[in-house]
Structures are given as C-alpha cells and as structure tokens.
Image: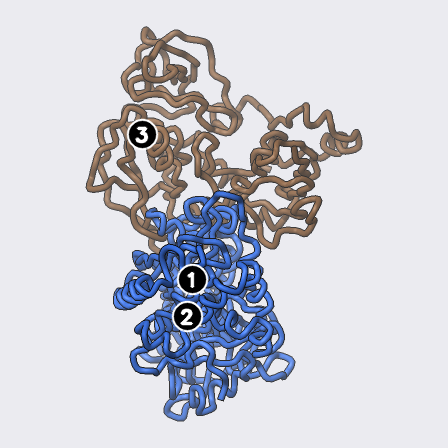
Amino acid sequence: MGRKLLTEHINVKGIDTFEVYRKQGGYRSVEKALKTMTPDEVVEEVKKSGLRGRGGAGFPTGMKWSFLAKPEGVPRYLVCNADESEPGTFKDRQLMSKLPHLLIEGMITSSYALGANTSYIYIRGELLYVLRILEKAIAEAYAAGFLGKNILGSGYDLDLYVHPGGGAYICGEETALLESLEGKRGNPRNKPPFPAVQGLYARPTVVNNVESIATVPVIVNDGGEEYAKIGVGRSTGTKLISACGHLNKPGIYEIELGVPVEEFIYSDEYCGGIWKGRELKAVVAGGSSVPILPKELILKTAAGEPRLMTYESLSDGGFVTGTMLGSGGFIAMDETTCIVRNTWNFSRFYHHESCGQCSPCREGTGWMEKVLHRLEHGHGHMEDIDLLVSVAKQIEGNTICPLGEAAAWPVAAAVRHFRHEFEWHVTHAKEAAQPGAVYPGAAVLV
Amino acid sequence: MAKITFDGIEVEVPDGTTILNAARQIGGSIVPPAMCYYTPLKGSGGKCRACLVRVAAGSAKDPRPMPKLVASCVTPVQDGMVVENTTSQQVLDVRKGIVEMLLINHPLDCPVCDQAGECDLQNFAFEHGVATTRYQEERRTFEKIDIGPLIQLHMTRCILCYRCVFTADQVAGERVHGVLGRGDAAEIGTYIENIIDHDFSGNVIDVCPVGALTDKTFRFKQRVWFTKPVNAHRDCPKCTGKVVLWYKGKDVLRVTARKDQYGEVKEWICNECRFEKKETADWTLEGPAHIDRSSVISANHYELPVLNQSVVADLPESTQRELEKNPPLKLGN
C-alpha cells in the first residue's frame, strides 16, 4: 500500500468540520510556519520538496514562488486555481468537498510564505455545493482565529475569499482566471508580463492548483527533504489520479509517484483491470489534452522499459512515443472504443470552449471538429487525415494560451497512433458511420 | 536603450519598445503585418497572430532562442535580442496558416465590399496567403444587427481583432458594444440591439482592418480607387478637425481621419466632421493627401517600400551593399 499524504483522513466522519479536522492534527503547519519559520524558510522547504505543480504543467512550485516580485509596499496575492474542468480530471473537486480545511490550511501557510494578505480560491461556478462547503469551512477558520487579523498572535493577517467563476474551461488558464476574478471576460492575457510580476490587479500574484496548495501543509509538517524521499527522481511525493473510462474500479487514487502504469491499471489496489474482461486499447494519461497512447506504448516505453506514473517516464519519447502526466486525469479505453469518435468528442469540447480571442484557436478548433465529424459520420476523404495533422500544427504553439495546444495534441496523437482507424473510416464509410462501429482489426503501431 | 537585430539589421530603441515598433523604426517591408495591433489603442495586439516572429536569441544576457514564435506587437525587446521575420521560413509558413484561418469565415465579397482597395486582410492575404482553400465546411453566418443610421455592421466579415471594442472603450467614452459569445461563435454586438451613436463612434470605421464596419453615408457610392483624397481641416469644437476628404469630381463622398503609413489614425475625429460636413465650403483644403503604398490607389505609382535611411546609414558598409543587392521582401514577392 502506498503512503497517503493528502487523503489519509478522507474517510474520517466529519473531517470537513474544523473540530474533527483539528483533532486529526489539522492546522499544525500553520502553527509551525507562523511561530517557528520565516516566510523564506517555508519557500525553501517547498523548494527542497521538489513539489511540481499538480494542475498539469508540472512546473516546480518552489521555483514559481521564488519568481514572485516583491516590491515594498505593494500587495501580493495568492490565487488557488480550482477551476477544474478538463474532461477526465476530477480530483480537486473531491479534495475540496471532503477535505476543505486541508486546502484552507494550505492557503494560509502558502500565503504566509508569499507575503500575501489577501488570497482567493477561484472555483468553477458549477461546483456550487463545493463552494458552500468551502465557505462554511472558511467561516470556521475565521472563528478559530486561523484567518483574519493577527493569526495566532503572530502579527500576520490574511483574508481568504472563495470566488465562483462563470463555468468556462478557459478560466482555468491562469491569466484568463485573473481576468475573470477581476470581473472581466475570461480571456487569456498576453505573456509577458507573467502573473509573478503583474497578476491580479496588476500586482505580483502566484496561481497554484488546489492539489499543489493542499500539499504544502504536508511539506511544512514533515520537511521538504522527507517529502522528496517519496517518488522517483524529479517526480517527488504523491499525486492524486482521477481514473475513469473502462476500468473495473474507476475513482480517485492517491499514488506515490513511480507506480508502474501496468500496476496502476491492473492491480486490485488501484483500478483492478479493464472491465468486462476486455482488452485495453488506449490510455489518455493526464486529462483529455495530453496525447493518447496505445496499450503497447502506455505500458512500456519505446525502449521496452516499464512505463511509470512519473512526469519523466510518461513523457519519455516526447510526443512521438510518449505523453504527459498532466493533471492526472487517467482515461482508459477498452477494445470497443472508436478512436475517431473519441477524438471527435474531445475536439467538440475544445471547439466549444475556445474563447475566440486569437485566430488559430478560434478558427482551427472548429475546423478540426468539423473534419472529425465528417470522418466519423462517413463523409470523410483520405486527404482529410493529413489535413487534420496540418491544422493541428497550425494551431500548436501559435496561440495566446495553451488551449490551442490542448486542442491540437489529442488530434495529432490520435492520427499518429491510430491512422489506420481514420483510414478505415474513409474506406468503410458506411460501416464506420453506424452507431457503435469500431475498427475491426488489431492495433497497428506507427 | 536596447540594441536589437531584426533580420540582420541592427537598430537601437528605447527600453520597453515592442519588437514590432522596433521593426517599424527600420521600415520597409520587413515590418511584420499587424491585423489587430493599433498603436493608439491601449491593450490592442496579440490576438490575430499575424505578426508572429522567431526570436533566435532572447537577449545578450540569455542568448537562448525563445521556444515558441512570439507576437511581436506585444513582446518588448531586450538588449541583444535577435529577431527573424522574413528570414525565417517557419514564420512565413505560420503566416500562411494565419491567412488561411482568417479567411475561413471571411467572405470573399471584395467586389461588393466598401473596404476593397484599402483592406488590411486583402493585403495580408496577397502578401502571405495561398490562392486556394482547403476548407470545405459550411461557413459562419450571422443574423444582421442594426446598429444605427451611421455605421453598417457586417459581422460575416469580422475577424475579431477587437480594435473597435477598444476604440469604443477608450475613444468614444461610452461603450455600448463588445464581443459576445465564445470561440468561432463570438461576434461583435450591442447589448440588446442598441445603436452606436456616440460623438466619436465613427472612429470604429477607421480602425476596422476589414469591411466589417463601414460608413453608411458612403456605402456603395464609389470604389475607393476612383476617389481622390485631399487633406483638409476645419475649426471643430469637438476634435482637431484634421481630416481627409475623398472626392469624386466636385463631390465629397467620404470623410475620414488621417492615417500614418501603417494605417493607424493619427488623430481621432468626431461624427460631425465625418458624417455631416460633406461640402467643400465646410473645409479649408490643404492639398492632395499622401497615398500610402498599401492603398490600391498607389497601384500605378510604383512606390516601393522604403527603409529608414538613418538606420541604414549606421550599418556596416558590407551590410548596406548586401541590402542593396538583396532588398527585404517586397509586397507581392
């Protein structure tokens, strides 16, 4: 059994209340940080831990914190990105609804480290029930003296607000989130300037994912070095994985980074294998925006090494034979899955969610979706397959924010690894257009 | 001050200058195209991606290349930066793609469009696009919205550059229109069918790079290449009153603000000057207006792009000879 650092007490009855959470050792990190550590020492511990952003990009959190501009007399902000909405990713929702005080504890400790006196949790608007849970927990923390003026007599003040968004995927992009938080349309900003220099209200701001912030109390309590001992290489600590798709036991698992993918899929401790005794066909390992990999490449790298659940191992081979850990949205697909239909489905999402601000994403996401729709419904041509790759390439890297890449990568990877299925949709158009039709042959590795 | 090398030409610009404006100091056709950037409008730029360039060296301190192409209109220069624009095949390829994207839903109704002949998208497509399209899906169409008696909105032609939104916000004072919707369903619109009638709202016509916002008082009256632009001014209590009158014979068909060589308005004009003063007697004439090379009226005037001579004079002789031998990309090359 792997160690559980975040979810150890998740099943304790009443853990969402301050009283029970405190009894389980909650808010120790706040006491430790505020009473015995300087803000820089907290930052140093996070750096030592090797914690990497759990929102998807995997950028070292401590390093991100150290980039924060610290001009005198200017307020700084910490913003928690709780706008989770990537298809396949649903771990933060669970963390916030079951363990709201863990996030609040992390917000206090992190805000102290960054010198922020006002912090925000920007939550996806649809998660109204989680918003209520968080608001109740924040009120409890205020009442207990962990928020507000002069916390625990340390002289440190912090106000924490939870702010619901309008429910747009783009608002999970950090600069679009800041625009939305400021009350404007959630369009991403051009970078530079980066939020660490000019973020919320043009002040230095750090934007971190829920899971990253919830990990900070663990790091402060146990020490960064202790945390760094867990995991493999530069992938330290534990990670929440939201597993879904054709698995016997879909759900949210806290794993120690380094678990082999094969073990994660097939062992009873985790997903328990593929449902109905079927064969695994493909996996999207880190949320719908990361490249899809066929069974052969997700279980083993191109070099034949076992693939591990780490940032490095999953990206081994780059985007040719590898993928990304991303946000940990693990989607398994069995042999009955039509890859073309699945890709069209993903594409529909990104087309719908593109903000429309920059031309490659605005026009390109719609174009890809329409071509995929045609292919799936038996009206495609052979040249459409290369057209898809070309359009994806025209979007990738040329947009204001990473939504363009999020839309382009799944399409490019699906064609790269499952080109034969796309071709089958052209050569067997009538057959392929039938509901539930699936390419009948075996996978062909490209 | 920061020194930047742009397509092999070195130029020194004040700190904080954007790559695009550094290129504009050099001049000529090596200046990246810009469909959404507009110097007088704060916050504009970065959206159309037409001006993407490759930064081959970030700065003297950190000479690593930037991993992605950057929007030159919003990226500030750094001392020692090396930028590739016309010299990078990657940039030229991407630009071809941007033209294709912009033309996906833009109707090719140039023969009946009032902007024909002075359309940025026409020029951009001519310079960087390809003659065919790979797009075979149904094109986007919109319900027509009436935004008042002065300005015609053709949403099908809009490329969502946001310039008119910034103009309404920053120049017209009272913004009654903006971008509604998301993705390729986004559109310029007014909140609950309002009219756009602020005193300076006519400026949205001048800033529109395509024919999405046109002058209702000039609409279908004449093709721009049959008109004659003349500089004129009047004593206006609301604006500077410095305009260009567009004549056909003795009739003033259109009044616009004066623009610089990059098509950017020098001084905003009020609606009274633009829409109501269409008699020669209303104006003091100054003489023929300079016709920019990007205007269709200059078609037979053979005005070639000019490099800033003061920048060229500072270059080493070998570079000057090289420039003479291989001038930067010309329009239509």
Marker disc for residue A108: 1
Kindly indicate the quadrant of the structure image that contains residue B217.
top left
- The residue sitting at 64% across, 27% down in the picture is B307
- The residue sitting at 43% across, 46% down in the picture is B102
Q: Nearer the viewer, residue A246 or B88?
A: A246
Q: CA distance from mark 3 to mark 1?
A: 42 Å
Colour approach in the figure: by chain
Q: Is residue B287 visible?
A: yes
Looking at numbered disc 2 in the image, what kind of residue is underneath it? Tyr
Q: Single out the mark in the foreground, 3 or 1.
A: 1
Looking at numbered disc 1 in the image, what kind of residue is underneath it? Ile
Residue A28 at x, y percent in the picture:
44, 71
Q: Secondary structure at mark 3?
A: loop
- The residue sitting at 61% across, 47% down in the picture is B54
Q: Name the residue tied to disc 2.
A: A27
Quadrant for the C terminus of chain A, please: bottom right
**Residue A42 appears left or right of B40:** right
Residue B130 at x, y percent in the picture:
51, 46
Kindly indicate the quadrant of the structure image that contains residue A316.
bottom right
Chain A, hue in figure: blue
Marker disc for residue B173: 3
Q: Which chain is rendered brown in the image?
A: B
Kindly indicate the quadrant of the structure image that contains residue A259.
bottom right
